[in-house]
Image (spheres, grey):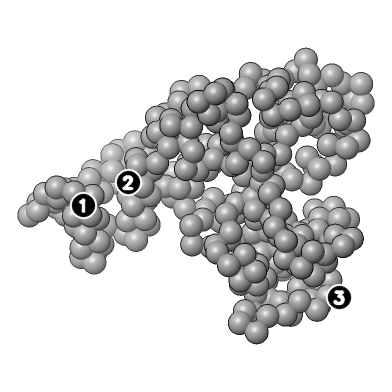
Amino acid sequence: MLMTDEEHTTHDNGLLQRIRTAFHHEKPESREALIAVLKQAQNDKLITPDVMKMMEGALEVSELCAADLMVQRSQIEAVDLSEKREVWLPKLIARGHSRFPVVDGDLDEVKGILHAKDLLRLLVEPEYDIASHLRPARFVPETQPLRILLRDFRVSRNHLALVIDEFGSVSGLITIEDVIEQIVGEIDDEFDRVNPEGDNITAVDPEHWRIRAATTLEQFNDYFGSSLEDHYCETIGGLITDRFEHVPHKGEAIEIEGFRFRVMRGDERQATLFLAEKVVAATGGDRTSEKETQS
């Protein structure tokens, strides 16, 4: 049930009052002191764990810039107009993003941004010229503070920006979802939902599957007829993290025993969703450098 304006005001005032109460006896003079006061407020049940997490995320965002969160240049998924449509179209459909940068042979030759809805038109109108229907690309410097970038996203209504270095070359890509997830945690979209039976494995097309990190190795092996195993882990997420030897970031990819796994969702603590595909020749854990964070 929707709240009335009066109920919204009462709710907001209640939260603000609890925050004021948390700082009534002590005014923090540093970031560490502020977090300590907030944690005490959480222990005293003045604020909820969710509010605490968002406040910590907001504090962290205030100290980061675009370069800290961007998808690296080598990991950007883009439409290359110099390639045949048959080459890049199936890849874009499998990725499930809503926006893609469009280039002409090189990432420094950005022509604009392609929206996913234009892909639908392309499917029904083979002669549709996407180059004449591109949205303008937005460029931001690597040093752009995230707090300013978030405001710019909101004001300009852009959801994606290309990050450039001091020489004007594209060094990465960042989306509004990346920044918001840094504050509130992982955001599941329609591509992250499991079906009513709770399956952790969802086929995207005959060659790609979305795999939840919580998928057990037994479930994965039963589904694919494979024999993945690890003496220390029971889940796909655990296996992949173990092979990376660090918490993999969104977009990092690795090949394991005939499968290629790309991180689609995750945060600083864990990867939660992967895009998997079978590969002809496994490389026993060699990493590749592609990324999936374009919203």
From the viewer's perspective, is residue 198 above or below residue 274?
below
* Residue at the disc numbered 3: 225
Q: Are marks 2 and 1 in contact (CB under 8 Å)?
A: yes
* Residue at the disc numbered 2: 59
Quick one: label 2, few (<14), some, or many (20+) residues within 10 Å?
some
Residue 28: percent from the left, percent from the top?
Answer: 14, 50
Residue 266: percent from the left, percent from the top?
Answer: 56, 56
Q: Is residue 79 left or right of residue 179?
A: right
- In primary-sequence order, the first of circles 2 and 1 is 1
Q: Spot the residue most to the front.
A: 167
Q: Amino acid at mark 3?
A: Gly
How far is mark 2 from mark 1, CA to CA?
A: 10 Å
- Give SS at disc 3: loop
Q: Amino acid at mark 1?
A: Leu
- Give SS at disc 1: helix
- Give SS at disc 2: helix
How far is mark 1 from mark 3, CA to CA?
A: 52 Å
